[in-house]
Image (cartoon, grey):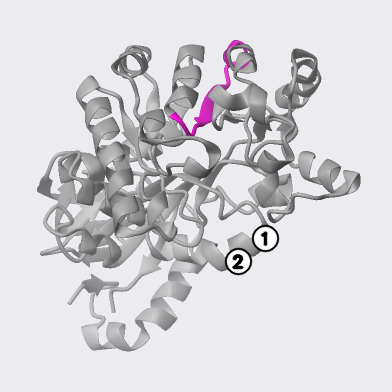
């Protein structure tokens, strides 16, 4: 039983009867900076293993080893394991009111307190996040694609024949560039948005000339690869990071040679034979991998995407063979792996389980990516994703050791963000 001591002289039976009613009401009524915690008896993740420790959250919502003068809540975490909250590095499920309503609560409940949404559909959406009692969400304020490129097909629900008004409306949800002149025009919007990062779309770029303008590939295409170096150069001059949506190995090569900061996908999550591609078109070259490592290019693999599609056993094994090969060589070269799933109806936990099943890295490396590396990449100016004096008082208390069984990642007793309890399954 996970025990909580509110005040001296209050019995545990009283706590059990009124925990959800009284405890959470009192906690929610406390102003930020007034609630303090003690978490004793737990084992805390240090990036490699779990070590016994006691931590306090002070009145500022920060971790401390010094016991506050007044401790409001004491948690006995004996036999429990504590990790930083989970981070989702690639998704699209919180970009509109419907997605927020249907998938937002699932993220919090699952311990995903940080998320990257790879496009943005309005300032009113952003305003719903980034407080101490909500998720912290980053948006790629600008997604740049071709006039017939991805994600227009998704925005138009797969329609190939559309009116000019429908096309214009869809294109207004992204930034469209088919030429340097287009790039000159849209860059004013980029600068006005002051984004932390932008997203560029590359899909089958080796076939750009033959596919661009072909109605068969409407909504599937990506940017002219010749524009990519110009986009990256402008972005970096403005202090903006660039994430590249890539599909084939050639897409990744174009992006890495241009100096993008992050690959938003690992090539090989599909084999588009219906578009004239085959296995070899998704295998990264050693030269490309070496350049990525040299430049410090990071990878959000979204390797688990195939599990959301209907592939035969042979097809899935073929995809996984490519993924293992690419991921193993990337890891051996020292390319950093960030955790992201592109799992619209679920959470990033699908990704860590899938990567674990591929056996491409020790489990502690994957857990570190999920709880430390990815949130630190998202918010480099903040002291989070770590257990250190002065760091944000954010953590998940798990029922068991996830290094032994990843199933424990779902078994959250308590989830606290900056001194605010967001998850409570302790009763």
On screen, residue 400 above or below 261: below
Residue 42 placement, left or right of 247: left
Q: Where residue 107 sits in the image (x, y, percent)?
A: 45, 60
| Crowd band around label 2 with a 10 angstrom C-alpha radius: few (<14), some (14–19), many (20+) | few
Residue 330 placement, left or right of 382: left
User: Which residue does the image show at 66% across and 40% down from the upper left?
Assistant: 217
Q: Look at mark 1 in the image and give the residue it sits on.
A: 97
Whether label 2 touches label 1, CB < 8 Å: yes
Quadrant of image for the N terminus: bottom left
- Of residue 356 and residue 67, the one placed in the foreground of this image is 356
User: Which residue does the image show at 25% across and 33% down from the upper left?
Assistant: 325
User: Which residue does the image show at 43% across and 58% down from the upper left?
Assistant: 308
- Of residue 118 and residue 318, the one placed in the foreground of this image is 318
Tag 2 secondary structure = helix
The quadrant holding residue 349 is: bottom left
What stretch of residues is rendered in magenta?
231-248
């Amino acid at each position: 039983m996970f025990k909580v001591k509110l005040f001296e002289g209050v019995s545990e039976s009283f706590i059990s009867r009124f925990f959800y009613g009284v405890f959470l009401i009192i906690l929610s009524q406390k102003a930020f900076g007034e609630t303090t915690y003690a978490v004793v008896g737990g084992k805390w993740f240090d990036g490699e293993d779990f070590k016994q420790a006691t931590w306090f959250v002070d009145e500022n919502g920060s971790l401390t080893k010094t016991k506050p003068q007044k401790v409001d809540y004491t948690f006995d975490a004996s036999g429990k394991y504590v990790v930083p909250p989970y981070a989702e590095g690639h998704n699209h499920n919180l970009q509109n009111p419907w997605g927020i309503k249907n998938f937002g609560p699932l993220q919090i409940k699952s311990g995903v307190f940080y998320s990257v949404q790879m496009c943005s559909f309005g300032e009113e959406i952003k305003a719903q996040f980034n407080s101490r009692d909500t998720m912290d969400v980053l948006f790629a304020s600008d997604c740049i694609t071709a006039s017939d490129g991805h994600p227009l097909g998704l925005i138009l629900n797969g329609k190939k024949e559309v009116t000019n008004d429908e096309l214009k409306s869809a294109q207004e949800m992204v930034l469209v560039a088919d030429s340097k002149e287009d790039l000159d025009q849209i860059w004013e919007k980029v600068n006005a948005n002051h984004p932390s990062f932008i997203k560029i779309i590359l899909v089958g770029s080796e076939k750009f000339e033959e596919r661009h303008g072909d109605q068969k590939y409407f909504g599937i295409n990506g940017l002219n690869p010749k524009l990519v170096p110009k986009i990256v150069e402008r972005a970096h001059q403005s202090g903006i990071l660039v994430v590249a949506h890539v599909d084939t190995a050639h897409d990744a090569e174009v992006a890495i040679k241009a100096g993008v900061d992050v690959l938003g996908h690992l090539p090989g999550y599909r084999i588009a034979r219906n578009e004239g591609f085959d296995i070899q078109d998704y295998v990264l070259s050693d030269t490309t991998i070496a350049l990525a490592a040299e430049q410090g290019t990071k990878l959000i693999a979204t390797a688990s995407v195939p599990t959301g599609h209907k592939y035969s056993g042979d097809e899935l094994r073929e995809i996984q063979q490519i993924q293992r090969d690419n991921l193993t060589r990337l890891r051996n070269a020292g390319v950093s792996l960030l955790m992201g799933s592109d799992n619209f109806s679920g959470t990033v936990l699908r990704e860590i389980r899938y990567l674990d099943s591929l056996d491409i890295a020790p489990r502690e490396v994957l857990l570190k990516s999920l709880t430390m590396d990815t949130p630190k990449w998202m918010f480099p100016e903040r002291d989070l994703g770590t257990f250190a004096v002065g760091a944000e008082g954010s953590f998940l208390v798990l029922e068991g050791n996830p290094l032994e069984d990843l199933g424990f990642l779902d078994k959250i007793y308590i989830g606290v963000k900056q001194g605010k309890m967001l998850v409570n399954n302790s009763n």
